Image (cartoon, grey):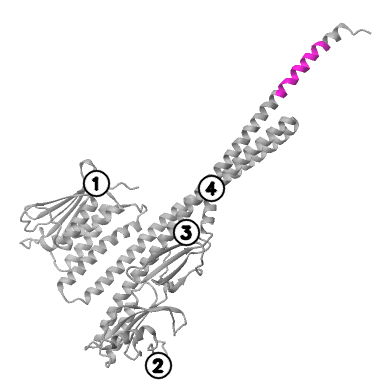
């Protein structure tokens, strides 16, 4: 039976439409296959980049931990050297007191015991002081709980002093081997000096014992889970004391010499210090790279599979889109957490810098106290003046670190505030001997000095003002001209001009100071070179004016 004409026409028209509809999926699958191959290549490239970046980050982390280990070793060595130097000065004072004390007079012994306790308060760590006679018996000490008949005659350091004294030889500071304390059983080191009678014979020893572990100073804590191990050794590597975990054979090691003493400080980071820091540093980038790698890998897998099964592709694509959205949300959350952690690290760094400046100020003040104490035992006025000048220089440096500790920005020092406080101290010291001196400070409030320039500028002002107080005295007693004028202004070209003027007799000529001469003159020339400054000396009629011009240093 023949088909109706309309049906034949419909079938004829339908067949071309079916062929035309089947063509687009083939082209789409071919495009998806190409995209899948491209995504695979990108995933491989990302993996290679992740490996290269991880390796580079590991090398940088290893270098950073090594640098921090060396810095920590140098810091502990410097701290130990300063402690031994301080202890040596204190022992020398004990030796002098022990030789000058009339031990048959009980009142003298009581006063010396009180002096020992006062001296012990200057030490940054717990120490025990003692003075012992030629038989090793106690004359006086800071420990009242010593048992009856307590003697150090069997100690090697006592035998060393006594034997050398018997042979007519002299021995300075002696650092003992580690010994067990007879009081509490702890391991201590003993620093000692011998006492002499008037004829030079052996009269006993003065001792200072301490636990080296108390000297451990941690300005850096590069590893939080396991602290670094620190140990003190002699030059022949005989161990003296150790702090932290017992040192092993692995890890990162750094050694530093303790000043001019035959001692070494060895710092050892644990073996996993580099690995843990490296993991903490690369984790955000590794997570991001893995997400990208996973995205491209999954895209390649989906595209290639969809090329053979379009239905599977659509289902997988929907799942992948959901996973990518979740991964992106998780990634954004982790990035926010890391950003907050970085902000906390910056705040912790600034706090650490302030703490370092505070400790430096305290150390300089301790040095000033020790120099002042040394000045009390000096008889000559010239020597006392030199020690007083040294104290003034140390106080000028300490004021820089004091201001850095109190300010928010540890990179800059407000010049006006610093000069006012420094000159106030100098004026106070001048008023102790002369009732007419006044120091007038005129400083631009907008001038700020970099930390590296604040110290030499403060020392320059200290030297110039001190010199004016010594040599710029006016011929009359008029209080209006017994002044020293200090100025600090910004001039054309961005340079800073520092001037100090007195109203005295002036200078015989306007020649520049020579590089030779006194210590103050050498220091003045050295500080001028350090600032890369120009120095001008001129007569001010009356008096002399010294002008120092330098360019401010950019703060990094």
Q: Is residue 38 left or right of residue 412?
A: right
**Disc assigned to residue 149:** 2
Foreground: disc 4 or disc 3: 4
**Mark 2 vs mark 4: which is more N-terminal?**
4
- Answer few, some or many: residues within 10 Å of disc 2's Cα (few below 14, many 20 plus, some between 14 and 19): few
At mark 1, the secondary structure is: loop
* Residue 146, quarter of the rendered image: bottom left
**Location of mark 4 (residue):** 54
Q: Which residues are magenta?
A: 11-26
Q: Position of residue 309 (x, y in %)?
A: 75, 31
Q: Label 3: few (<14), some or many (≥20) within 10 Å?
A: some
Residue corresponding to mark 1: 551
* Residue depicted at x 65% and y 35%: 299
* Of residues 410 and 33, the one drawn nearer to the viewer in this rendering: 33
| Discs 1, 4 touching: Cβ within 8 Å | no
In space, the residues marked 2 and 1 are separated at their CA atoms by 69 Å
| Residue 105 visible here | yes
The extreme right residue here reads: 1
The reply to whether discs 4 and 3 touch (Cβ–Cβ < 8 Å) is no
**Which label belongs to residue 222?**
3
């Amino acid at each position: 039976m023949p088909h109706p004409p309309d049906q034949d026409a419909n079938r004829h028209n339908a067949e071309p439409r079916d062929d035309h509809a089947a063509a687009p999926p083939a082209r789409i699958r071919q495009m998806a296959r190409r995209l899948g191959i491209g995504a695979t290549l990108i995933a491989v490239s990302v993996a290679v980049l992740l490996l290269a970046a991880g390796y580079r980050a590991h090398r940088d982390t290893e270098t950073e931990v090594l640098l921090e280990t060396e810095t920590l070793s140098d810091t502990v060595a410097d701290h130990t050297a300063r402690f031994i130097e301080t202890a040596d000065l204190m022992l020398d004072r004990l030796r002098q007191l022990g030789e000058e004390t009339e031990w048959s007079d009980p009142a003298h012994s009581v006063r010396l015991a009180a002096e020992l306790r006062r001296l012990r308060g200057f030490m940054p760590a717990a120490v025990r002081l003692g003075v012992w006679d030629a038989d090793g018996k106690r004359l006086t000490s800071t420990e009242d709980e010593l048992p009856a008949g307590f003697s150090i005659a069997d100690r090697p350091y006592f035998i060393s002093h006594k034997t050398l004294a018997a042979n007519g030889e002299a021995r300075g500071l002696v650092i003992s081997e580690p010994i067990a304390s007879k009081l509490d059983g702890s391991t201590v080191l003993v620093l000692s000096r011998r006492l002499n009678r008037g004829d030079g014979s052996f009269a006993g020893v003065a001792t200072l014992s301490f636990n080296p572990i108390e000297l451990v100073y941690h300005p850096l804590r590069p590893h939080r889970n396991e602290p670094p191990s620190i140990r003190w050794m002699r030059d022949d590597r005989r161990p003296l004391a150790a702090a932290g975990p017992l040192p092993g054979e692995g890890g990162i090691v750094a050694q530093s010499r303790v000043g001019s003493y035959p001692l070494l400080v060895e710092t050892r980071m644990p073996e996993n210090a580099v690995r843990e820091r490296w993991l903490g540093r690369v984790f955000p980038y590794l997570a991001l790279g893995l997400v990208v790698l996973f995205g491209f890998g999954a895209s390649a897998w989906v595209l290639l599979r969809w090329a053979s099964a379009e239905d599977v592709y659509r289902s997988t694509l929907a799942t992948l889109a959901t996973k990518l959205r979740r991964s992106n949300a998780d990634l954004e959350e982790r990035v926010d957490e890391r950003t907050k952690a970085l902000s906390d690290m910056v705040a912790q760094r600034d706090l650490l810098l302030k703490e370092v400046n505070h400790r430096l100020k305290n150390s300089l003040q301790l040095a000033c106290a020790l120099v002042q104490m040394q000045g009390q035992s000096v008889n000559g006025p010239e020597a006392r003046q030199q020690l007083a000048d040294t104290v003034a220089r140390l106080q000028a440096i300490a004021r820089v670190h004091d201001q850095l500790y109190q300010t928010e920005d540890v990179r800059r020092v407000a010049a006006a505030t610093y000069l006012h406080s420094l000159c106030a101290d100098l004026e106070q010291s001048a008023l102790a001997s002369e009732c007419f001196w006044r120091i007038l400070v005129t400083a631009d409030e907008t001038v700020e000095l970099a930390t590296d320039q604040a110290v030499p500028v403060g020392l320059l002002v200290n030297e110039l003002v001190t010199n004016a107080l010594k040599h710029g005295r006016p011929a009359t007693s008029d209080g209006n001209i017994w002044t020293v004028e200090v100025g600090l202004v910004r001039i054309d070209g961005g340079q800073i001009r520092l001037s100090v003027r007195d109203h005295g007799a002036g200078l015989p000529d306007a020649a520049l100071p020579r590089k030779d001469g006194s210590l103050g003159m050498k220091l003045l020339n050295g500080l001028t070179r350090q600032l890369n400054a120009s120095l001008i000396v001129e007569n001010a009629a009356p008096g002399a004016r010294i002008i120092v011009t330098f360019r401010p240093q950019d703060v990094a």
